Amino acid sequence: MRIAVTGGSGKLGSTVVSYLRDAGHEVFSLDQTGGREYGEVRVNFTNYGETVDALMGVNDRYDSLDALVHLAAIPAPSILSDVATFDNNMLSTFHVLQAAKRAGIKNIVTASSETVLGLPFDVSPPYIPVDEEYPARPESVYSLTKVLEEQLEIELTRWDPELKIVALRFSNVMYPEDYVEFPSFDADARSRKWNLWGYIDSRDGAHAVLKALEWQGKGFERFIIAAADTVMSRPNAELIAEVFPDTPVRGELTDHETLLSISKARRVLGYDPQHSWRDTVTP
C-alpha cells in the first residue's frame, strides 16, 4: 500500500513509519517537522488547505494514497492549555478525515487513547480488566477530544458504508530505553495506578497499526492496544487489593497480565504483542 502517516516524526509515529516500510509498504510521513528527506512532507493540519492538498498528492512524491494513519496530535494532557489542546486536536482530526474523504481514502487508522477509559482512575473503573464495552469516561480536555474524535469517526463511517476507520486506544508508549525506570515503580503501587499499570512498546504499537490496516472490515471499530503485561513486578492480585479493593475482577488473571484488556484486538485484528520490558531489564 501507499500510506500517509500524520505525526510521522513523533514517538509512536517514527516507529510506525519504519515498521510499515519494513513490511514492504510505501510510506510518507506528514508532520509539522521534517520535510527535507524523500518520504517526508511538512504539513500544518490546522490548515485545511494544506491538509487536503497533501492528501491529494505532492508533486513528484505521490499522486494518490491507499491508506491513512492519523497520529498527529498534542499527545497528552497539560502540555498546552486546554483550549489550545482542544483547538489543535479537534480541528486537525476533522481536517485530516475530511481531506481523506475528498481524496477517496477508505482505509484509515487513527490514534485514540487509553485515557477515554477513565484515566487517571481517581474514580475506580467499573471492573478490571477494563475493555471497550463500557461508555467512555473522559476526565481531561485531551481525553474529551479523543472521545469526540471517535464519535466523529462513527458518523463518517455511517455516511459512507465503504469507509473503514479503526481507532486504536493506545496505552502509554515506551521505547526500550525507557524500561530502565520500570523496576522503581514497585515501591509505590499508586504511582502508576492512573492507567492500571499499563504501557505499550512502540514496536507493538506499530504492529497494531499494520494489523488494523490489513483488517478487511468496514465501518468503525475501536480497540485497546497495550502490552501483554503490566509495568509492575508485583502481582496483579496484590496491586488490585491495595489500590482498587472494591472493584470487581472479571475472569482469572495471571500475576502480570495486562489489566487493559487486549482480548478484542487479539481476536479481531490478530494483534499479538511481542515485546516486554522484562526482556530488557531485570524486575
Image: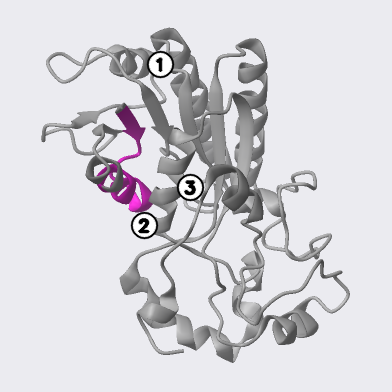
Which comes before the other along the chain, label 2 or label 3?
Answer: 3
Q: Is residue 73 magenta?
A: no
- Judged by depth in the image, the label closer to the viewer, 2 or 1, is 2
The residue at 60%/72% (across/down) is 197
The residue at 48%/34% (across/down) is 109
Question: Eyeballing the image, is 197 above or below 145?
Answer: below
Q: CA distance from mark 2 to mark 1?
A: 31 Å
Residue 247 seen in the figure: yes
Q: CA distance from mark 2 to mark 3?
A: 27 Å
Corner quadrant of residue 278: bottom left
Which comes before the other along the chain, label 3 or label 1?
Answer: 1
Judging by the rendered image, the residue that carries numbered circle 1 is 48
Judging by the rendered image, the residue that carries numbered circle 3 is 80
- Judged by depth in the image, the label closer to the viewer, 3 or 1, is 1
- Judged by depth in the image, the label closer to the viewer, 2 or 3, is 2
Q: Give the SS element for disc 2.
A: helix
Which comes before the other along the chain, label 2 or label 1?
Answer: 1
Q: Amino acid at mark 2?
A: Arg
Q: Amino acid at mark 1?
A: Tyr
Judging by the rendered image, the residue that carries numbered circle 2 is 203
- Image coordinates of residue 128 in percent, x first then y, are 77, 66
- Judged left or right of residue 108, residue 267 is right
Q: Which mark is residue 87?
A: none
The residue at 79%/44% (across/down) is 135
- Image coordinates of residue 158 in percent, x first then y, are 67, 16
Q: Amino acid at mark 3?
A: Leu
The residue at 56%/88% (across/down) is 186
Judge the density around disc 2: few (<14), some (14-19), many (≥20) Cα neighbours within 10 Å: many
- Image coordinates of residue 182 in percent, x first then y, are 46, 81
